[in-house]
Each structure stands twice: as C-alpha cells, then as structure tokens.
Amino acid sequence: MSANIDKMSTKNGLLLYYHPYSYYSHKVLMALYEKHLQFDTVFVNLAKDTQYEPWFLKINPRGEVPVLQDTGKVISDSTRIIDYLEDNFSNGDSPRLIPINKGVEVRQKVIHFRSLIDPLPARILTMGSFHHSEFVRGARPPFIGPVRSMLSNADKNVVKVLRELAEKYPEYSEVLLNKVAIHEQKSCMIIEKGEYQKVLKQFDDVLTVIENELASHTESGKETWWLCCEEFTIADIGLAILLERLNQLGYASHFWRDNKKPHIERYYTKVQQRESFKKTIPNLAFHTQMFISTYKKQLAISIGVGLCVVILVGGAYLIFKRDN
C-alpha cells in the first residue's frame, strides 16, 4: 500500500489514484493540467494487481483506475471525473473545457465528438496489438519488446488471477467474477483476427469523421482551430490521448501517416507541443526508470547468468589454450 493514500492536496483536496501508462488516467491528468489544478497522486501498480487489493477495492469496487478523491467524495471513471472537474472547477484560473461562450453549436459539437471518442475500446485495441503484430509498425515505449510480452502474458492469466482473488476476498467476489465474465466475453475481439479487424475499423471510422472535421478548418479564420473551435476542449483531450496511444502501439502508419489522414497528422504534431500533453505523457527517462523498476529482478538474474557464461567461456578458453 502506498504511503500517500491518506495524503490530501493542500489547495483543492484533490487526490488521483492512477497509473502513468493508463489510457484513462492520461485523460484525467490532461484535464487537471488544462485546468491548472493542484493535486496529489497515488500510484496504483497494475503490474502487481494492486487495483484488486482490498484497500483499493474499498475505494473503487470495480478495481479500475483512475479514481479521484476530493475530500470526502470519491469519483471513478475518467468521463465522470472530467465532468466533475468541469462542474466544480471552472472559474478563475481554471478554464472551461466545454465552452459556454461559443454558442449552442460549439457545445453540441464538443459533446458529439466526445461521444464518438470516449466509447472506443482502448483496452481491446491495446491488448489485440500484441496478438496481431502484422498491423503494427514502429511501436514506441512503453509498448515495446518485453513490455508487450509481459502484458500479453498477463492478459492470458487474468481470468485465473481474478478467480483466485475472488476466493481470497469473498466480500469482493461479485465484482471480480463480473470482470471475469466481461473479459471472457470480449476475449475473442482480442484474439480472433477477423474480430480484431472490426475493432480497427471502428477506430478508423471515427478517425475519418475527425479528419473530415479538421479538413473543414482550412477556410479563412479557422486555420488555428483545435477540433471544435479555437479553444481546447474535452473533445481535444480525448483525441490527443487517443492519437498518442495509437502512435505508441505502432498504429500511426496504419491510420494516418503516408498522407492517409494529413489533417490528423498535423493535429497530432501540434497537440504534442501543448504543455498539458507534455506533463501527461511519460518521457523516455521515465520509461527507463519504470523498466528498471519493473524488471530489476529479471535484470539481476540476466546479468548474473551473463557473468557466469562469460566466466565459463573464459575459463574454457584458457584451458583450451593451455592444453594446446
């Protein structure tokens, strides 16, 4: 359990339970940074199934991140959290992410694009990319090499892990077994190529609608617009995090590069320069630190085995030289 669990932030009392590689945590982080809010964090180690430990299930019985705690209130689900921030922290230095001064048309457009982006099955897309590498080109950290293998193996074992936890913590067995049922129901979408291609098409259909919207901004006065207007909105947060996840998984070439969707490519380049994006997305130094922390035991074993091999080979070579 983290030592920071009972720690509350000094200004707004905001405490975020999250994982730095969680797609949905990224959405909330970017919203918090866009609103210039002070908050504290608790790292929930998904690699060690910390989200299913009793202390966290008391906070969120669904065993999922992110979760926002605001003094005595607990809000789960990234969409609900962002709505909560919008409803309660939209004044002074905290700008609105659904503009109310741009008219009904802009508000409806923000809501429309949010309704297209938010339901996209990010987990299925992510896990499926590890099974269907033929669609992937140029994956980036953290979804490279051993991390891909680790996540793929963890996904294969998740049903067993959840069943064991349901027996260990009977008071939470209902929610854990429900997650088993959902996982089994959706596993074919991850494993079967034909089903996974339908998922990829679902993403491509949404990106095509977005490409068409961005293409309409070429008319005079809209060249500097974001997705819905000149202001950065909730819809832009969803799109920015979506494009980043697709790029990390190695899907940029599949969806928009090589002039497939040039306006999305330009948008992605632009949004990467935004300060809230830079603060949200871990950099290479962070990836390296996480990798070493996660694999330190494996690395120690590998280094030890490597040294033994070097010693044995070196010894054999010396004996060979002596006897010849």
Image: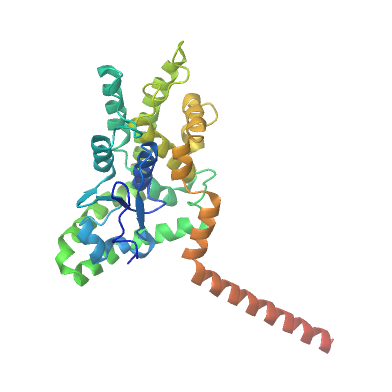
Residue closest to the eye, 221 or 153: 221
Residue 111 in sight: yes
Which quadrant is the N terminus positioned in?
bottom left
- Image mark count: 0
Q: Is residue 242 above or below residue 21?
A: above
Horizontal placement of 75 versus 20: left or right? left
Residue 193 in sight: no
Quadrant of res 93:
top left
Horizontal placement of 180 versus 283: left or right? left
Q: Where is residue 84 in the image (x, y as percent from the top left)?
A: 24, 40
How are the colours assigned in the image?
A: rainbow
**Residue located 44% across and 61% down the image:** 150
**Residue located 35% across and 42% down the image:** 37
Horizontal placement of 119 versus 231: left or right? left
Q: Where is residue 185 in the image (x, y as percent from the top left)?
A: 24, 51
Residue closest to the eye, 283 or 181: 283
Quadrant of res 240:
top left
Residue closest to the eye, 79 or 190: 79
Which quadrant is the C terminus positioned in?
bottom right
**Residue located 29% across and 60% down the image:** 51
Q: Where is residue 2 in the image (x, y as percent from the top left)?
A: 34, 64
Q: In this view, does 295 lie above or below 282?
A: below
Q: In this view, does 129 lie above or below 206?
A: below
| Residue closest to the far right | 324
Q: Is residue 9 above or below residue 113?
A: below
Q: Position of residue 256 (x, y in %)?
A: 48, 31
| Residue closest to the far top | 220
